[in-house]
Amino acid sequence: MEIFTIVLVVVAIIVVYWAVKPVKQGEEWTIERFGRYSRTLKPGLNIIVPVMDRVGTRQSMRETVLDIPSQEVITRDNATVTADAVAFFQVIDAAQAAYEVRNLQRAITNLALTNVRTVIGSMELDEVLAKRDAINSRLLQVVDEATNPWGVKVTRVEIKDLSPPKDIVESMGRQMKAERERRAEVLSADGEKQGAILRAEGQKQSAILEAEGRREAAFRDAEAREREAEAEAKATQMVSDAIANGDVQAINYFVAQKYVDAFEKLATGPNQKFVLMPMEAAGLVGSLGGIGELARSAFGSDGDDGGNNGGRIATRSVPSTHSS
């Protein structure tokens, strides 16, 4: 009886071990009943029928990184490029990934290799080196569509490295250097052009301002001469009116004015080292006295002393004027 009990306990343990299947997080297991796919076990504790059911494939549902081996690819312009890539994929259907394709990773690797040759071979070398994003997008689209029946979602396909031959790299370096020198010369010429334009604009503005200044100065000079002429004409008219009214002192005004102007020019001449004055100083004083007498007459001054003194000075100025 004890032996039967022990055997029964052992059998029960074995049955429980076969029937209870704990599935880890991030995994899914396929169950086969008599060799045929039956269902998929999700993460957690699952129970199957012992002997009838068995675990077929333990499939990881996490995103997987797959290295694509490097290979030499000939571009459309017959340049050889060494290219390698990396692919990221995730199983979304464990049954399809287990039963639709054999050796899933190898299938994806070969599919990526062939499409890398196809995509890069349809482009020229300059496009291959400059348009990696376009290559990655085309590879992702093609590989994802091809692996869709396998229950796989390809999330990314990236070109890791593109290595042209050494001679092409050297020629590209020389071409880049020549292009940079050309750009530098173009920028230098453009800078000189802009500088010349700015200098010409500055000279133009300077000439315009200078011309405007000369015009303004000429206008003000003309205005000053016009006012001076008007004042001279007015003074002449006043003297003429005074002479017409019998005021003899008005004649002394013009005589004194010319006398003073001539004396000023003689004294300030650039070639005069000394001045000879064959005249009496009283003549100049008499002329100035005539101007003073005329001013008193113009302003209606009635001062007797001033008038008599002015008369005496004017009286002395007449012989001096005749003697000179």
Image (cartoon, grey):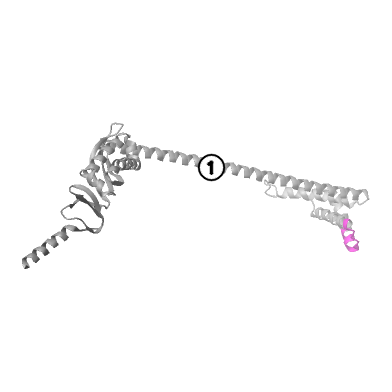
**What x and y, as percent, mark residue 182?**
39, 37
**What x and y, as percent, mark residue 87?**
27, 46
Q: Is residue 127 magenta?
A: no
For the residue pair 121 and 192, the one nearer the viewer reads as: 121
Which residue in the rendered view is the most extreme toward the bottom? 2
Q: Is residue 300 magenta?
A: yes
Residue at 68% in and 43% down: 215
**What x and y, as percent, mark residue 7?**
8, 63
Relative to 186, say whether 43 is above or below.
below
Residue at 27% in and 51% down: 63
Q: In which quadrant of the rendered view does residue 158 lie? A: top left
Relative to 34, say whether 78 is above or below.
above
Q: How packed is label 1: few (under 14 Cα within 10 Å), some, or many (20 or more)? A: few
Q: The residue tagged with tag 1: helix, strand or loop?
A: helix
For the residue pair 133 and 172, the one nearer the viewer reads as: 133
Dominant secondary structure of the magenta stretch?
Answer: helix
In the picture provided, is 283 more to the left or to the right than 272? right
In the picture provided, is 140 more to the left or to the right than 54? right
The residue that disc 1 covers is 199
**What x and y, as percent, mark residue 212?**
66, 44
Q: Which residues are magenta?
A: 298-310
